[in-house]
Amino acid sequence: MGGCDKQGFPMKQGVLTPGRVRLLLHRGTPCFRGYGRRNGERRRKSVRGCIVSPDLSVLNLVIVKKGDADLPGLTDIEKPRMRGPKRASKIRKLFNLTKQDDVTKYVNTYRRTFTTKNGEIVLTFFLLHLHTFWKFHGLFIQTRRWWLIPCFFPTGKKVSKAPKIQRLVTPLTLQRKRARIADKKKRIAKAKTEAAEYQKLLASRLKEQRDRRSESLAKKRSRISEAKK
């Protein structure tokens, strides 16, 4: 049993009050997830008591004992779960599949097929990122703006919706992975060749500098020896 009020504050078991209280909670306790906190850190959070009050918006109940008659709309019908897992590994775990089995046909159990209403037009907005240039005192200044573009689509068509499978290994993903690895190898090889060329050029420049230095020193010594004579 539990629930939330209209502002979203949850009910906490063991707090015998119909209103809100501020409790010092640590990570892992109900009503406080505590992500991003230090070990042992506690925060004071607002929670509701476990006594039902009239200002609750959601109240979750569990049927402990069922009588002779069914509750209309609750126990006389079965409502299947609308959404299942989206991650490929969790779908395989749910249906006991192997890596060679196709996961997409199992997601089609959640696919919804419906027909849009006739005689209506669906208004959809697209966000468009535009780069605009304008002249100010002889200078061109670039600005970036987001524009809402309305698009109208006629209705009356058959449409189906299904959740997108995440982390699904397909030939396209494997191809992209191979392309990333090949691009990385190419960049590493290019960096190595450029580093080798740079070291070669640096060695030649240092050799030229040493030669010029030794030549200037030799000329200086010859001038000093001639002056002594």
Image: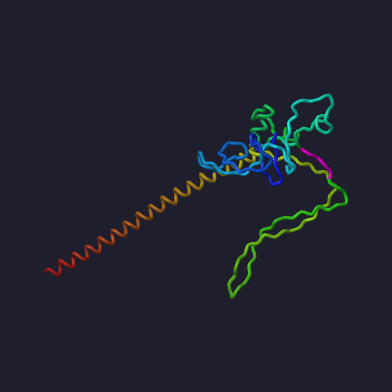
Q: Residue furthest right?
A: 119
Q: Residue furthest top?
A: 68
Give the left or right position of residue 119, taking residue 47 as reference: right
Q: Residue furthest left?
A: 229
Is residue 118 found inside the magenta-colored segment of the image?
Answer: no
Q: Which quarter of the rendered picture does the C terminus lie within? A: bottom left
Which residue is painted at 57% across and 44% down in the image? 44
Q: Residue furthest bottom?
A: 137
Which residue is painted at 70% across and 43% down in the image? 5
Q: List x then y, in percent, for residue 184.
A: 52, 45
Q: List x then y, in percent, for residue 61.
A: 73, 33
Q: List x then y, in percent, for residue 138.
A: 59, 75
Q: Nearer the viewer, residue 60 or 95?
A: 60
User: Quick check: 146 above or below 118?
Assistant: below
Q: Which residues are magenta?
A: 111-115
Which residue is painted at 18% across and 68% down in the image? 223
Q: Quadrant of residue 71?
A: top right
Q: Nearer the viewer, residue 161 or 28?
A: 28
Q: What kind of colouring is applied to the model shown?
A: rainbow
Q: Nearer the viewer, residue 215 or 27?
A: 27
Q: Nearer the viewer, residue 19 or 214?
A: 19
Q: Quadrant of residue 105?
A: top right
Q: Which quarter of the rendered picture does the N terminus lie within? A: top right
User: Quick check: 196 above or below 97?
Assistant: below
Which residue is painted at 67% across and 59% down in the image? 146
Q: Main secondary structure of the magenta part?
A: strand
Tally of marks: 0
Q: List x then y, in percent, for residue 149.
A: 74, 58
User: Quick check: 106 above or below 156?
Assistant: above
